[in-house]
Image (cartoon, rainbow, N blue to C red):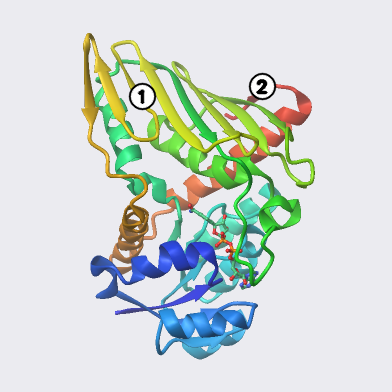
Amino acid sequence: MLRGALIGLGNIALRGHVPAYQSEGVKSKARIVAVMDVVEQSRTKANEVFPGATFYTSINTLLENEKPDFVDICTPPYTHAEYIKACAAKGIHVVCEKPLVEKYSTARELADAVKKAGIVFVPCHQYKYSPLWKSIRDVIASGKLGKVALAQFNVYRLHADTGTANWNPQWRTSKSHSGGGILVDTGAHYFYLAQYFFGIPQKISAILRTLKHTDYGVEDTAIVTLEYPDTLMQINLTWAANQRANSVYVAGEKGSLSYDGVHLLHTDGEETREIPMPDVSDKSQYVAWYAALFQEFICRIEQKNMATDLLDEAFMVMKLLDASYRSSEEKAVLDLV
Ligand SMILES: NC(=O)c1ccc[n+]([C@@H]2O[C@H](COP(=O)([O-])OP(=O)(O)OC[C@H]3O[C@@H](n4cnc5c(N)ncnc54)[C@H](O)[C@@H]3O)[C@@H](O)[C@H]2O)c1
């Protein structure tokens, strides 16, 4: 049984990570023995969700006392580097929420420190474990669409999500805490999905704007285009919409895929068929993606698999985030290779 410590018992920890640790495939292999958070209120919550786990307010004391096999980092982005480094220095495996860090300038040094430490590092890129994104990837990879010309991903929201009330609910709209606005918060997911679907893009261009939420210290809208030899991938994200919606359209030379937030349709020649998807409002679905991700993490630890593919994927997300901000400022298409 692996012994783990969870850092930052806020929203994503309580809604995604905690139930995933309690799931069948994970609970027999890993156990959270300690929790660290900077707010005292989390002490009671920690006792409730992980009975018997010790609560800490200092990472160094936790690592010294508990000597865990792994640490799960669920704190806001600007804290990730410090915690990842502390774990790497002690050879402790890390699973960490996205994005890797809040600043590209610190990402390279951090990635090198993780590689040198030879630990397992898994970023929470959990969309790759969802039936929707797996199905889209499988259809693209099967060649059924032929060459994909245009893949478009749209995310409409009314505002930024708030963080837990006990700490700093507005951290997402503070650049120093988050690293950026909707591009960092939601775009990070699409930047690892881009790699999952099509690999590393060659060029990038972006337009980032604040269209509605002028009180935010970050952009509320982002349009990003990733260029591949045969494919353009366009990501449109906004917190300035009047209603929540998600959609996808992937147009290939032999067929297409469309998703309207409920139905995933594959059109092949004249025929359209629906690829069945679980109900998106079913919260157990979301937990299942985390459970699958944790199983991969545990499996890598058990097999002493120190492959750096997932660290490289998280680093590339940081590179694409940084290039998007530069492209928008310089009004330029930037080369990535
Ligand atoms: N993968 C996803 O789909 C997904 C979804 C939501 C959030 N996230 C990521 O999870 C992380 C947390 O987001 P959230 O929505 O849970 O935020 P939150 O504000 O709800 O929770 C943050 C928690 O961290 C604690 N904290 C703050 N600073 C700390 C520090 N220095 N040391 C220890 N604890 C500290 C807070 O007290 C709070 O309990 C972010 O990186 C965010 O991007 C990922």
- Asked if residue 119 can be seen in this view, the reply is no
Q: Amino acid at mark 2?
A: Val
In this rendering, is residue 305 above or below 322? below
- For residue 181, which quarter of the picture? top right
Instruction: State the image coordinates of residue 236 (x, y, percent, origin top left).
Output: 56, 29
Q: Locate the N terminus and report the quarter of the image it occupies.
A: bottom left
**Residue at the image position 42 percent from the left and 65 percent from the top:** 17
> Which is nearer the eye, 330 or 34?
34
For ligand 1, tell me if the residue under mark 2 lies within 8 Å: no
Q: Locate the C terminus and report the quarter of the image it occupies.
A: top right
Quick one: label 2, few (<14), some, or many (20+) residues within 10 Å?
some
Left or right: residue 299 compared with residue 244: left
- Asked if residue 255 can be seen in this view, the reply is yes
**Residue at the image position 65 percent from the left and 36 percent from the top:** 240
Q: Which residue is mark 2?
A: 333
Q: Which residue is mark 1?
A: 258
Left or right: residue 87 compared with residue 130: right
Q: Amino acid at mark 1?
A: Ser
**Residue at the image position 63 percent from the left and 62 percent from the top:** 81
Q: Which of the two labelled residues, at mark 1 and mark 2, occupies the earlier sequence position?
A: 1
In this rendering, is residue 272 above or below 304? above
Instruction: State the image coordinates of residue 145 (x, y, percent, origin top left).
Output: 29, 18
**Residue at the image position 27 percent from the left and 17 percent from the top:** 267
- Looking at the rendered structure, the number of numbered marks drawn on it comes to 2
Quadrant position of ligand 1: bottom right
Name the mark on residue 191: none
- For residue 297, which quarter of the picture? bottom left
Left or right: residue 175 compared with residue 255: right
In this rendering, is residue 176 above or below 13? above
Instruction: State the image coordinates of residue 249 (x, y, percent, origin top left).
Output: 41, 23
Q: Secondary structure at mark 2?
A: loop
Which numbered mark, 1 or 2, is in the foreground of this view? 1
